[in-house]
Amino acid sequence: MAAITYKNASCIYEGSDKLAVDSLNLDIEDGEFVVLVGPSGSGKSTALRMLAGLEDIDEGAIEIGGKDMTGVPSKDRDIAMVFQNYALYPNKTVAENMGFALKLRGVSAAERRKKVEEAATVLDLTEHLDRKPAKLSGGQRQRVAMGRAIVREPQVFCMDEPLSNLDAKLRVQTRTQIAALQRRLGTTTVYVTHDQVEAMTMGDRVAVLRFGKLQQFASPNELYDRPANAFVAGFIGSPAMNLVTLPVTADGVKIGDSTLELERDNLTKISDAGLSEVTFGVRPEQLELTESGGVEVVVDLVEDLGSEAYVYTHAGSGVDLVARCNPRRAPKLAETVRLHRHAEGAVHLFHPKTGERLN
Amino acid sequence: MTLTVDTESDANQEAVAERVRKIREAQDTGVSRAEGWRRRGPLLPALIFMIAVTQVPFLFTLYYSTLSWNLVRPGSRQFVGLNNYVAVVKDSQFWSVAGNTVILIVGVVLISALLGLLIALLLDRAFLGRGIVRTLLITPFLITPVAGALIWKTTILDPTNGILNWVLSLVGLGPVDWIGDFPLAMVMVELIWQWTPFMMLLILAGLTSMPRDQLEAGRVDGAGALQLFRELTLPHLRRFIELGVVLGAVYLVNTFDAIFMMTQGGPGVASANLPFYIYQRAFLGFDMGQAAAMGVVVVIFTMIIASFALRLIFKSFSGKEEAA
Amino acid sequence: MSTPKVVDKTARTTATSDAAPVRKKKSKKFSPWSVVAWIVGLGFFFPVLWMVLTAFKQESDAATSPPTLFFTPTLNQFKAVFDQGIGPAMLNSVFATGMSTILVLLLGVPAAFALSLRPVRKTSDALFFFMSTKMLPVVAAILPLYVIVSNIGLLDNIWALVVLYTSMNLPIAIWMMRSFFLEVPGELLEAASLDGASLWRSVREVILPLVSPGIAATALICVIFAWNEFFLAVNLTAVNAQTMPVYLVGFIAGEGQYWAVLSAAATMAALPVILCGWFAQNKLVRGLSFGAIK
């Protein structure tokens, strides 16, 4: 168990002039569960692999437990990794797969057997211990991959999208089990995923990456309530936050023919920045249907999820807005309705060019 | 702690590339060179061995080709420059033999590839005893070439007691002196018999690796069997057919056993190919200089073909591999 | 403190992550095409079959027209072949083939490894070189080879053939084994490395078990080509080191018209490799198709 620090760490794409990871700075505490999330090509897997020693650190450094890992080979870093495709040894049984690292360290066969059986009990693999990976289902293989990592009792767990090959139901189930396991073991964990739902539910803190650069590193709540830029705002939350660039008026922002009013503070911040337009963000659950006032919109699509419904609309000037509503009282297609903001609903304002948060 | 960072903008790319270049310069080149040697290490024994055993003799051949040297007349070695090459070019037999070689290679490769394709198509469907049929089919490839040539020459093609003539006699056609009258053709037939299994196996590998859902998509789109074959299967097989043709051609340049056993190159040099002709010159005529010169010519000729061949192999097969 | 058990609840549901789609096996039909396939197969096999049959005939039954289909088999021909001394030639072939194949593996496996798992900057160049040596016609080198070998005093010595067969098979072997090495997923090596294995250990415990069928296939191909090789053998050996193919040719010189005993000799020359190829058929197919068929 150890703290991890990325200090301006960068990594170059093989054979090109682009940076896969660009000056990443992260301070991860001992025992923390940190999720690296972002779209494809954001560098999250590369950042993880740099930690594990599978990619070179081309610039900067990574420290584990205070020790600089530059030049330290993977086998000496005491890190266990769960791969996306599990990377189980096909010619070894489940027990041998899980015990391999211990065998390499010279642990006695009896001791190995004991540890493997302990892990197998926790992961419900006891009856499969003598089978080879080819005879296991995907979910079972995934658990063997986890077991292989657990048995080692390393100082850090690295997980590279371990759930992406499982079907939806199994994914949800395993998610909670991994989080519970980590809490029990208390090992520092760095977890990579492209699924923001996984990030939000599993992580103590989440680092959002884009094009190799860190966008924001904070707790899930903070990412949700105060995204640092437009990208994070649009990435976290499902359905995504409504983000539209709107012209500014004296009282607020103009949507179509109506004006959505803004608070005094926000208006000041906008004028301080000297902007005539602003990127305005509001989450679907902050918008509601109303009889009067607000903005007039036309309904394009209604998604009824049973517990709630989402109404996809557009305002006259090509501005698209998604709002949440009660499924029993959802409007119909092509209907014209009015939307307004909840009184306490948070508004997010971003610079239209840089995407930086203004308020 | 929240951190805010600039979002991506195009103007940054040049700056990034500049940084990357600086980083690369700063990296310890000494370490990566040592690593490079460590990686190359395991390759060296094989490399050195091959250079010693193949390149050195060839250099000698080049040297010999500039000598007039007859093994039977000791002390007759003397430098004659390019005289041997001139003699070779003027040697009409050499050109006719070269022609034979080309006919042989092209004919055998094309026909066995075609036959291989047809048979592979036959074997692509499951049927009773398919495994046995495949076993039977690969046997000609396994048999020692001299033994196979011997069997063809005696039991099958012999004018009096050979099976082929017996079968023909059943339909009233007269006995044919196959080897006597059609020496080159008969050698080619024997070689086709030997090489078709190889082609077939390669193409069968291609057929088996054909993604089935492509064919299903084609069928749903309304393609008939022939169209499926032409538009989908054949392009996929191209790689395998090319590989078979190239490898077959490379081996066939050197073919010797069948000619030695069946016709001894005759009558005259009607069925000799370049290797056999050179063999005759060197080991039966003991004319080293001339033989060496011919050898060099063959090498040049082969290198031209080989450069196409190698480029082909690399293009079609390395494409999928350069990842690890 | 009770440990939260990680239970696979989906054991009872039907949908699992990667249950392979079960396809109905096509029933083996008896169709006209399968008859054609059988005819073609038997046709190609016929000369070999005839050779083996003839080996069991009396001379009087061997070269006849119409060909004798029913006869009393005899082992006399084989006995005659043995009496004429096929033993040494057999041993020579075994030695040359075996030794050269071992050498090919010793040299080739590391080379293939270097060229595949850790791509060296000059990988393509090295491969190109190896393949190009294969393209070099042997006939161009035979003269100096003859002179060099005789100067070293290795003429009619089986070791000359061992070295030359190794160089003959090495390029193909490297090419094949490289393609098998490339099939090992990179992640397995990474996992082994994280588990604490040195490169040598990972090779031994993870990679070699996975590529061993491929190596066996490569060895089989080498055996076939080495055993059947004639040109180098006939030119560089005389009596002591002659291999089976050379012996066979010498046999013909003496017994040219006696087809039965010739067939017996031919059968004995060809049989070992044929049997090898039959029994290891799948490996052979894998090797020949460079691992495209599993």
Image: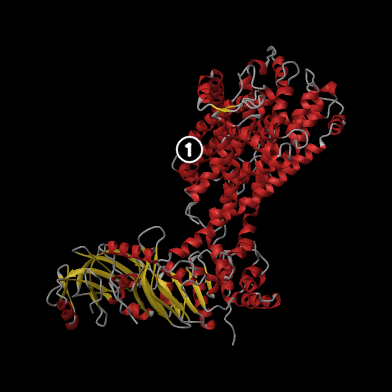
Q: Residue C154 or C119: which is nearer the viewer?
A: C154
- Say whether residue A221 is left or right of residue B147: left
Residue wearing tag 1: B307
Q: Is residue A92 above or below residue C112?
A: below
In the image shown, does A293 or A275 lie closer to the viewer? A275
Judge whether B109 appears above or below C61 on screen: below
Name the chain letter of the residue that bears numbered label 1. B
Query: In the image as oriented, which residue stretches furthest toward the front?
Result: B75
Where, quadrant-wise, is the N terminus of chain C in this rendering?
Answer: bottom right
- The residue sitting at 68% across, 67% down in the picture is A130
Q: Position of residue B255 (x, y in %)?
A: 62, 30
* Residue A28, placed above or below residue C264: below
Asked if one can make out residue C32 in the rendered structure from this viewpoint, the answer is: no
Nearer-the-camera pick, B203 or B145: B145
The tally of labels here is: 1
Residue with the most extreme left position: A250
**Is residue A246 rendered to the left or right of residue C33?**
left
Q: Residue at x 67, y 71 (%)?
A: A127
Q: Residue at x 71, y 77 (%)?
A: A110
Q: Local crowd at mark 1 within 10 Å, few (<14), some, or many (≥20)?
A: some
Image quarter of residue A87:
bottom right
Judging depth in this view, the residue of C200 and A257 nearest the camera is C200
Q: Secondary structure at mark 1?
A: helix
Q: Position of residue A341 (x, y in %)?
A: 24, 77
